[in-house]
Image (cartoon, helix red, strand yellow):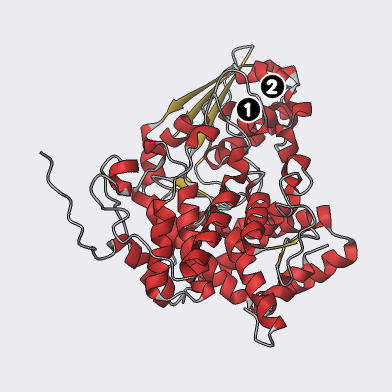
Amino acid sequence: MASLISNERPQADRVLTDIADYVLHYKVESTVAWKTAFYCFLDTLGCGFEALTYPACTKLLGPVVAGTMVPNGAKIPGTAYQLDPIQAAFNIGTIIRWLDFNDTWLAAEWGHPSDNLGGILATADWLSRTRSANGEKPLKAKEVLEAMVMAHEIQGILALENSFNKVGLDHVILVKVASTAVVGKLLGLSRDELINAISLAFVDGQALRTYRHAPNTGSRKSWAAGDATSRAVRLALIAQTGEMGYPSVLSAPVWGFYDVSFKGQTFKFQRPYGSYVMENVLFKISFPAEFHAQTAVEAAMQLHEQLLAIGKTAEDIAHIYIRTHDAAIRIIDKRGPLHNPADRDHCLQYMVAVPLIFGRLTAEDYEDQVAKDPRIDVLRNKIKCVEDLKFTEDYHNPEKRAIANGLTVTLNDGTVLAEVLVEYPIGHPRRREEGIPKLIEKYRINLARIFTESQQKQILNTTLDYDTFVAMDVNKLVDLMTL
């Protein structure tokens, strides 16, 4: 007969208390973290503005029930919507992630920490409007940046040593956990309430990765983070009512997260929470490509120029050999038919073929109109990807965090072009000085997609200066960016 499980209420799992104590007590002192969070905010919202030009994205936006009005609700940048904070978090989170162009964190688990801005900004804006209506002081933009640093840290530190993809779970579980923690702080939860809220995030059913992989790759991967960060706002609000939590949600025998969803493994940690993740986050600056392909696309762009210089085109290519790392092989080495934009932006061969043919890779290049060009699939079929063990080692090395790809092109006449190797993409911390001006230019371009010239000028005058930005009331900042 099986032994009885004790019904003594245990102390909260250490993972829960460490997260709660971090968000409640840690002081962000790193200038690099603050400034990087500032650039991250601009870039993240810029990605959302570009997404608003895609009907497949905008059809998901707005209130759940058409015509719903929410006094003092959160406004959605780039739109005229004003929504409750839960639905606002979904809207903001969805536009941020739609085009796979916001920041990235690569470790044992992958993910996009700026996805958390959906819940952070929606909550901060709603709280600020409510406080202003009641004659109280609104939140400042610096509090949004602080929440971003902390959300990045929670998601990224949990990802360093713990692979959720290997047990079939999607990385947006970490968005839900991180957003719950920092939104809970914004709401003013007590330590016990915050621990309860974080436990509720783990006790939830978690998203499967199936929508990111063949044969089911689809557009849910573009709104999954919006769903996760909005769920986090909901759970934090539930905890605020005094609703109980589940202290051993991770460690409980049989019924806990470790036994049910993590194959009996416990979480491992490489370092304590601080500001490491924001300081080292990867920006997608030049290409809306899954991050493991960023250096491959950069190499392909160089090869396109080389081909032009010798009077050749992609049609003169016999085959392409790509040295890459294990994560790229597992996620984006894909053959066979590609059914939709979500399929294409997770195919390494597609992301290399397009720049070799056209000399570019934009979000529009994943759409059907470009994808139907027969040259793309012809070239895709000439590409072979092979893992280089040293690339994989450097990918996991915390001192390097490289994302290397090397492309070797052989032409039909037998000519072999020298390998073009790119180890660190332009959005990498090692190329920050080179990357930030291009990031700002990306932001300017994205503003121009949505706003009039006069509104663009007003936004730029206010948001490009760090000191001006951090001192702004959140609601006034968001007002600048709405229609």
Quarter of the image for residue 290 reads top right
- Residue that lies at the very extreme toward the top in this rendered image: 413
| Quarter of the image where the N terminus is located | top left
Q: Residue 129, image x and y in percent?
A: 70, 76
Quarter of the image for residue 36 reads bottom right
For marks 2 and 1, the one nearer the N-term is 1
Label 2: few (<14), some or many (≥20) within 10 Å?
many
The residue tagged 1 is 350
On screen, residue 265 versus residue 192, left or right, reads left
Residue 34 appears in view: no
Q: Residue 408, image x and y in percent?
A: 54, 26
Residue at x-position 75% and y-position 23%:
311
Marks 2 and 1 sit apart, C-alpha to C-alpha, by: 7 Å
Q: Amino acid at mark 1?
A: Tyr
| Quarter of the image where the C terminus is located | bottom right
Find numbered disc 2 in the image and state the secondary structure of the residue it sits on.
helix
**Front in this rendered view, residue 235 or 210:** 235
Q: Residue 433, image x and y in percent?
A: 59, 60
Q: Amino acid at mark 2?
A: Ile
Label 1: few (<14), some or many (≥20) within 10 Å?
many
The residue tagged 2 is 376
Q: Are marks 2 and 1 in contact (CB under 8 Å)?
A: yes
**Front in this rendered view, residue 481 or 250:** 250
Q: Residue 442, image x and y in percent?
A: 72, 54
Residue 288 appears in view: yes
Quarter of the image for residue 360 reads top right
